[in-house]
Image (cartoon, coloured by chain):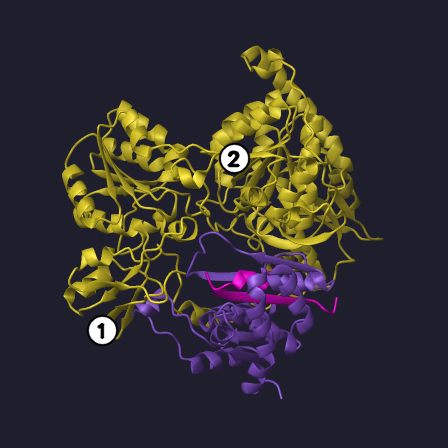
Amino acid sequence: MNNRLRIYCTGVGGQGTLTATNLLAKTALMNGIPVVAGEVHGMAQRGGVVESVVLLGGWKAPKLAFGEADCMLAFEPLEALRGLPYLAKGGTIVASSDPLPPLSVSLGAKAYPSMQEISQTLNKYADKVYLLPIRTLGKENGSIQSGNTLLLAAACLLNILPFTVESLEKAIQTFLPEKLHASNLASIARAKTALKEQGFLS
Amino acid sequence: MSKHPLLSETEGEQQLLLGNEAIVRGALEAGVGMITCYPGTPSSEVVDTFRRIKAFDRYHMEYSINEKVAMEVACGAALSGSKSLVCMKHVGLNVAADPLFTTAYTGLPGGLVVLSADDPGCHSSQNEQDNRAYARMAHLLCLEPSSAEEACAMTKEAFFLARSLEQPVLLRTTTRISHMRGAVTLGQLPKAPTTVSFTKNPMRFVPLPAVARKRHQAVLDVLAKARIIAEHSVFTLETLHENVKIGIIASGVARAYMADALEQLGIADRVDCLELGITWPLPTERIIRFLSQHVAVLILEEGDALLERDIKALAKEHGLSTLLSGKNATLTEVLEYATPLVQTRIAEWLDLPQRPSAPDQALLSATQELPNRPPNLCPGCSHRAVYYAARKIFGDEVVYSSDIGCYTLGMLPPMRCADFLFCMGSSISGGSGFAKASGSKVVSFIGDSTFFHSGMTGLANAVFNKHSLLLVILDNGTTAMTGHQPNPGMVQESLGEACQHLDIEAIVKALGVTNVRTVNAYNLAALTKTFTELKDMDGVRVVIAKQPCVLYARRALGKRPPNVARVIAQNEDTQRCLAEFACPAFIKNGDEIAVDESLCSGCMVCLQVAPKSFKAVKRQGGQQ
């Protein structure tokens, strides 16, 4: 039971968070790792918060409560902050540094915290924090959404996820529509240099 | 076109499936021949999946107009000899309860499985009702999966039991099970559904009082047989250890929390478990034996304390002195369970020192201060325009009776167009009663799918009983909130050959409403003129505000206006438009207002709210 890993994923509706977490779960299963995942559908529509969980290594319950996640994959920086209570002590965060402001911010009623504040708070509560401009990089590789895959690949390269980048590539070729292969594979390839550029890998 | 993976004929293949997809696979393996539903979260993906995999050589399926109709169509199919599945969310079963209670008496030889997807925690529902109570009241067998694998296996078993006992079976999931993903090992897929033939027998199938009295005894006899099946079922799981005197009895998703909590506490080998997959009728002999073998037993079930009450009654009846525990201040009947909660409850029960650490309060309050992302009507949603016009004309002089759909979000400021709501269809009948008794003016809002669901009867009643209300039918041509499922209001070209479009205006007129206006929901002048004219009249008045759901128009109909709105003047009117119309595509930078052109749908309602502040410009980047 040593390979048990509880992952909390969060993002904004319409961003492709659920597709990415589903891909993560399928890759795990392909590698023979027991997996349960959970998501909440319904009123979380476009622009709302979308949360999902992936539990690897033999967990049964498809839900995480506060303080339970070993790792948080956040596809949006404000949502990384909001998801912070879910992280267990000593947890790791891989998150996007490309903000998607909520309506209250666009309408000037609320302020979006600065990336510096976000980074400080995340680092205060997490053991390790990796912030990457996934939407920017995804766009460079042909689709913003492929940035989500870049985040998954980064988590593989940082040895957070218990499978290789190669198996993630294989999962993309197996489970995603063919028209999405090129951008997603390019984003996986970009993950390593992105981590180096940010000083997370030497 | 390649076959959908859910139709794979490779026995033993493992797939990662959504709980609701696992139910689809289980039904296919069982040889389901008829599927009906009314969509509702968290049940919708079941029938949406049947629709997507298009294996129409195997089954008939339909989106019925409400749950009662869905139940009756499925009951008819099951009576005629087909294995039938009817799917709905928990509150839908209230609507469908009438046929269910009586078909439980007569029985259905083909086999009927009723999926009730309950929603503890109210993720997308108006209450947390626990539909296991229906199994007890209507005399139904009840199966409750705790994983995706079981969702598939139990669906198959439910059909086997429904067919062999000729008795409707309740398959009860909760949101976490319907929307979980887990590995499912595929079984054999039959070549074709197996049917039985119908033999006429009015003395069984026509429940006149004399027949019904006999059938009541018959259903109790069937349940007695089902109890014996439950005693020996593979879904009644016992985990026993040597010399262990404490045990847990659990059902549903609580079984998953229990397993993880015991693992976390490191006491999985020091506590015995009795896990119930068939939760009605109860395997009473197994329960009594388990109780008598243990000095203390904890009962874990999310929702109402149904098992707990039954098990306590059993213990009393059999004079057992086992110390029984269940719900308390830690595990209540309200909201969902979670692993740390169950862990805490077990630790309390066994007086163990380990407690999951409480979340950091400072962090929790800090996250509560963050800008939220509440659900909102989409940019370009025509409901926003109708509500804007309604608030302009009626203000706070009327009481707004709302209904169930995306448009319930009209409750939010600045629209504030919902003062009360009971259930599907209640906007009309609830509004009628409110207006009659109080003398208040009532404006009711209902969507097209909800109108077909149970608004038509309320409207007929309003005309018949000479009620006075103004009804606005928000006709966006689809069942938007649950994922654009078909309804009779959908345009014929989208419905295809399998369904017939029904005209709402013709129905309203046929129901005897003489004051009917149909307006374009994007036309503010037409809306305000119509509302002004109808405002002070008496009797039943109906406005049909038509405009396709903006997401549906874009995705399914391929329609997207070529222009977007752009702000051309910063003035009081622009500010008023932001404050009163509050489209999510508006952005405020300091005091300046702009339109996010990537979000703008091109509805151009803001140009009507503040004509001198906005203009239409060509959309950059062309069609998406």
The residue depicted at 29 percent of the width and 70 percent of the height is A108
The foreground one among B239 and A57 is A57
Asked whether the viewer can see residue B581, the reply is yes
Q: Secondary structure at mark 2?
A: strand
Q: Residue beneath label 1, please? A: B591
Residue sitting at x 59%, y 57%: A38
Name the amino acid, label 1.
Asp
Query: Against B293, is A11 above or below?
Result: below
Specify the label residue A90 is tagged with.
none
- Image colour for chain B is yellow
The residue positioned 51% from the left and 49% from the top of the image is B334
Tag 2, which chain?
B
User: What x and y, as percent, mark residue B3?
Assistant: 64, 47
Q: Which residues are magenta?
A: A1-22
3D distance between C-alphas at marks 2 and 1: 52 Å
CA neighbours of label 2 inside 10 A, class few (<14), some (14 to 19), many (20+)? many
According to the picture, the residue beneath numbered tag 2 turns out to be: B62
